[in-house]
Amino acid sequence: MLKLERKELVDLLRQMLLMRRFEEKCAEMYAMGKIGGFLHLYIGQEAVATGAISVLRPDDYVIASYREHGHALAKGCDPGKIMAELFGRADGLCKGKGGSMHLFDKANHFLGGHAIVAGQIPIGTGAAFASQYEGKDQVTLCFFGDAAVNQGVFHEALNLAALWHLPIVYICENNRYGMGTAVERATPVRELYRRAEAYGMPGEAVDGMDVLAVRECVGLAVERARRERLPSLIEAKTYRFRGHSMADPGTYRTKDEVEREKQRDPILLFRDHLMAEAVIKESDWKALEKEVRITVEAAVRYADASPEPPVEWLCTDVYVSER
Amino acid sequence: MAIITYREALNQALREEMRRDPRVFLMGEEVGLYQGAYKVSQGLLEEFGSKRVIDTPISEAGFTGVGIGAAMVGLRPIVEMMTFNFALVAIDQIVNQAAKILYMSGGQYNVPMVIRGPGGPAHQLAAQHSQSMESYFYHVPGLKIVRPGTPKDAKGLLKSAIRDDDPVIFIESELLYGTKGEVPDGDYTIPLGVGEIKREGRDVTIVAYSTMLLLALQTAEELEKEGISAEVVDPRTLRPLDTALIMESVKKTNRAIVMESGAGFAGIGSGIGAIISEQAFDYLDAPVERVTGANAPTPYAKNLERAKIPSKERLIAAVKKVLAV
């Protein structure tokens, strides 16, 4: 994978760093009361969305769960508009009507964050169905967590995708906890990628802390989907460093476990790797930090400057005919 | 004008819309090879092929979600529920996803899909196959609800539903599939949200739709013999609701009855009755009456089933009550 150009490698690092700093700022804004509701941070899992989405074309589709800030950023959504959405402002991606759990961006083919566990899996399957119906070679990436595989629609959707040869890659981000329930308390067969066998589709596990490994694994699956119309299931083994949401102190995990996992921080691992390979120097890293900080600060300024949505918007967008 | 069945009228609507727009496809259990559990999709597989008339495994939540995703990116799916009772298996997809995606996305993604199939109490099908489902969906902003009562309405409304840019719940009726009526030749549509006065009258307004419409019209003929002139208003679409037409009628007759085959508690009649009370109270000479299904699951036994569903006798009693005769 080091066949990648230097610029591409640095872009992957920048993308992950932007997700991290953006969400650290989100946590700060939540504490200040500027962000309300549920806020599920992606911190620790950045290599998955970054590596996976980096292989897509702009017209490929991405759909995700409620922990979707990272996926939205990787799909090209404007950080200012995301932050404005989290602030509940008129210039947010969804006019302040969606919030943290429901980021959508049609221009970037981002089919949204969905907050019923597994609810997005058949919908992503439908986007892939449409690509096949119209004879287009777009691919859909459908992201969900480890808890989603125990919902009925996971089975229904994968069954249909395999039956109909749909161009979709299902990416299970196994961060080992569905809210407070460890995966071994929820699922008897813990190698979640093996569920693919039941549908006769390829299934593979990948180190979700290694952005290049994710990129390679998803890249092969995307090509298979694009050229052969074969769906795949990929289990990215990852870890979230924070609680399930801002309201969760995470007492169901030991401090030792969390500290041990933080040793495999996907951003630091990749930074160190690039330094060891002499792709970047310390000064490059500092420049990236500065660049990302400027982007995040601009996003906050944009969100702060945006007005609250006018009350007249309360009942718009309920029906197209009354838009 | 040809006289055809309600089933044939629906079939014509599907066929004509699929010919008109290649983005329209039909998906569901037994819609293709089997030609439809109730034969509404008869002949469509032959004409349009398996790409556009798609048999699914039994997995309502899964294929309803597929329809939603396909609609979001530009197709116009028609998802058939073999009976609407099975839509409850997909209710998360319908209520939490289809109905809300336009709103949650701030107007970016709409979901132009039709979810259709038969509903309502039928021939001794018992509790799990014999329910009026409209009030489950009536409550949900973002959904449109259609319940046609005649072949003409069935065809014109289904064509409008397919062309509509929002998710439409289109509930047919097993009991109506074989009923016949005049249907205009050629392409025509009936707009969603426009009701029709199916029978003019002076003394009382009966709001009724689907199978209850037929019962109301028959009962009105009997009442006429007793010198009571009943006006029968068919809203056809429950959401959006043609409130103006209902008010116009109530202001003329000064008495109102709302009928539904489903259980009355928190039902359609509660909603329409409340709107009449709010908007036409000063015109009412009696409280709004409701004639509804009993507050019980639908029983199997023939006599109990008959007692569960509104009857001519109960409607006549309600009419006499509001007229104080």
Image (cartoon, coloured by chain):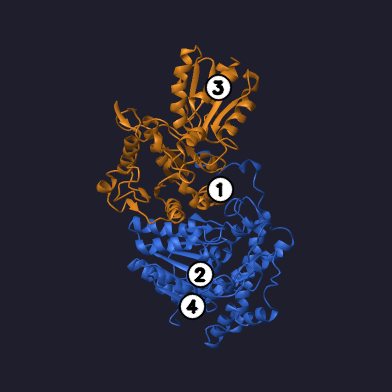
Chain colours: A blue, B orange
Q: Which residue is mark 2?
A: A172
Tags 1 and 3 both on a single chain: yes
Element type where label 4 sits in the image: strand
Name which residue type carries label 1: Tyr
Note whether residue A124 is visible: yes
Query: Which of B220/A103 is in front?
Result: B220
How far apart are the two marked residues, 4 and 2, measured between alpha carbons? 10 Å
* Vertical placement of residue B72 versus A145, above or below: above
Looking at this rendering, what residue extends furthest in the top direction? Answer: B227
Number of marks = 4
Tell me residue B255's x, y (percent): 58, 20
Name which residue type carries label 4: Val
| Residue A206, label in figure | 4
Q: Point out the frontmost of discs 3 and 2.
A: 3
Q: Which residue is mark 1?
A: B103
Query: Which of A309/A126 is in front?
Result: A126
The chain containing the residue under callout 3 comes to B
